[in-house]
Image (cartoon, rainbow, N blue to C red):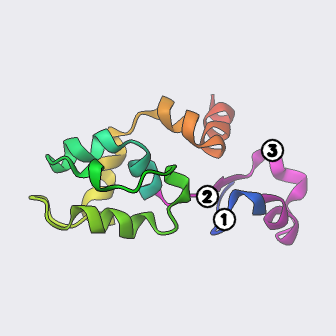
Amino acid sequence: MLCDLDAPETKIADDLKENEISDYKDSVFFMIQEMEAWFISQPEILDHFYNDNISNRLAKKHASLFEEPDKELQRITKNTARKTYHKVNHGAQLLKLLDIDKLMRDFPEFKRLIDKLK
């Protein structure tokens, strides 16, 4: 089961209990970050996709620490040739560029999901 946590990773146990699914915890996977955090975690794909060195405009912190990564992407892309980041217009294309191995290293819940699917 895939769930949108909408909370920090530390709240997983609370969410499992609140939704009465603790018995299934090994089969429940949480989308903790917005997918935009994944893009931010691999700034080289942003530079490539937007054909601009936009990664140097990102705050220097782990991608999971951005409270609103979608707004951060909008901020750093607003003056690019491809225009401001838009989830529908750009999201699917950026997802194709992501390095799965890097995602598994950077996001433990993502790794847990992939390991379960293998």
What residue is disc 3 on?
26
Bounds of the magenta span?
Answer: 12-35
Tag 1's secondary structure? loop
Q: Position of residue 31 (x, y in %)?
A: 60, 56
What residue is disc 2 on?
32
Q: Amino acid at mark 3?
A: Asp
Tag 3's secondary structure? helix
Looking at the rendered structure, which numbered label has been put on residue 66? none
Any part of residue 86 in sight: no
Are dots 3 and 1 in contact, CB under 8 Å?
no
Looking at the rendered structure, which numbered label has been put on residue 5? 1
Dot 3, how many residues are within 10 Å of its Cα: few (below 14), some (14-19), or many (20+)? few
Are dots 2 and 1 in contact, CB under 8 Å?
yes
Could you tell whether 11 is left or right of 7 in the image?
Answer: right
Q: Amino acid at mark 1?
A: Leu
Distance in Å between CA atoms under marks 2 and 1: 5 Å
99 inside magenta stretch:
no
Tag 2's secondary structure? loop
Are dots 2 and 3 in contact, CB under 8 Å?
no
Above-or-below relation of 110 to 7: above
Distance in Å between CA atoms under marks 2 and 3: 16 Å
Q: Position of residue 48 (x, y in %)?
A: 20, 41
Of marks 3 and 1, which one's residue comes earlier in the chain?
A: 1
Seen from the viewer's position, the closer of residues 96 and 75 is 75
21 inside magenta stretch:
yes
- Residue drawn at 32 percent across, 53 percent down: 92
